[in-house]
Amino acid sequence: MRISKIIIFFLIFTIATVNYIYALAPQSELRYEGIDVSDWQGYIDYKQVKNSGIDIVYIKASQGNNIKDPYFEINYENAKANGLKVGFYHFLTAVNEEEAKQQATFFASIISGKQVDCKLALDYEQFGRVGKEQINQIAMAFIQKLKELTKKQVIIYSDLYNSESTFNNQLSEQGELWIAYYGDYRNLRNINASWNTFIGVQYTDRGVVPGIRGNVDRDLFSQEIFLNDNSEIPTTENPNDSYNTETVFYTVKRGDTLGRIAEQYGTTVQQIAQINAIQNVNLIYPGQVLRIHTNSNIKGSESNSTGKTYYTIKRGDTLWGIARRYGTTVQNLVKWNNISNPNLIYPRQRLILYGNFASSSYTYSYYTVQRGDSLWRIARRYRTCARRIARLNGLRSSNLIYPGLVLKI
């Protein structure tokens, strides 16, 4: 009987061990409230953000080879002025190791001279046709070059799928994990990821925080997110002659081409295609919303800046209707845009609006699914959630998408 009890105990212990042999858990207590921001949020009132209980803000600094986030400087200045701890991240688009090193150099040049509190972050989530082995080599090249230039520690932002299936153990040794997971992150059992722990979790992309217009990513971080050395980042020269900064949003109209749009905003077809993940530059359609980077900086301080919103006039618009939609006045629109006759506006004319505005009407975008897409990645790109896209398009399962399917977003 005693032997039987021992065997039973051993079996129970073994089963429990097998059930929980793999686990992905916080490295220590997640006790720091955070957000991560970019030009999507526009102007942010960091005094309200701080008063709401946020401790840490991760700020997008750059993307690709020569795109500086237009709100980087003002986000950094105002977050610091209000006592928030800051971190910086770069959105990597490299397709080989040499380009990864160039992007690391560009990132380092953008954040040169800044005093950063949190580990630098690599956001690498769009791989195109690059294979798994090459993906890891690209990430390794970026991280090693960035460490060399900044003398700072680096972390890797990843969703659960890529932390398990794409990124390898060698990469995990180069930086800790900041995971995007919108389920119960406290119970990630039977997860065979390249990391055993994470030091940050992005738990929603639909967060609401006072001082921020619209939704914002919400995060929780552990103590390990902070740098051992938060001294000023060493100076690195910009490897490019210039960079693109300003972001505007343009709704494609019938008859538009990327060439005409690029000419209108002083950019290139290639830039617009890269930013919006357009694989065929001849395939755009009415109603599609494009993000476009031009060459203007968003400047100002907490005391004198109210941010800028851009609106492209459509057929049938009136200044009265636009003012009502954005909660301002016709007089303000006239003053901000040097309009001599308020009754004389025309389609495609671009207006500047100053202030924390949120349009009261919804505009839908349309996206054609590409090979390798998932609803999660598409949702991240458009700052929404997979469930919302599935519901809007009548999809019974978020996995039932296929190349060529047009999604309303």
Image: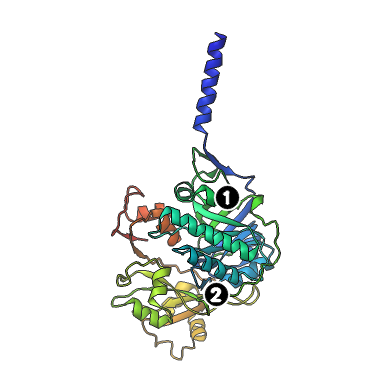
Q: From this view, report whether residue 1 is shown above or below residue 209.
A: above
Residue 350 location, x and y as percent? 43, 81
Rendered image quadrant of residue 82: bottom right
**Which residue is more in the foreground, 173 or 215?**
173
Q: Can residue 201 be seen in this view?
A: no
User: Vertically, is 367 above or below 388?
Assistant: below
Q: Residue at x 49, y 70 (%)?
A: 65
Quadrant showing the C terminus: bottom left
Instruction: Please say which color scheme the image uses.
Output: rainbow
Q: Which amino acid does label 2 sit on?
A: Pro
| Residue 40 image offset from top left, x and y in percent | 50, 67
Q: Which residue is drawn at 39% across and 82% down?
A: 263
Confirm whether residue 383 shows in the render.
Answer: yes
What x and y, as percent, mark residue 365?
36, 65
Q: How crowded is mark 1: few (under 14 residues within 10 Å), some or many (20 or more)?
A: few
Q: Mark 1 points at which residue?
A: 173
Residue at 57%, 75% (x, y): give it. Answer: 238
Residue receiving disc 2: 239
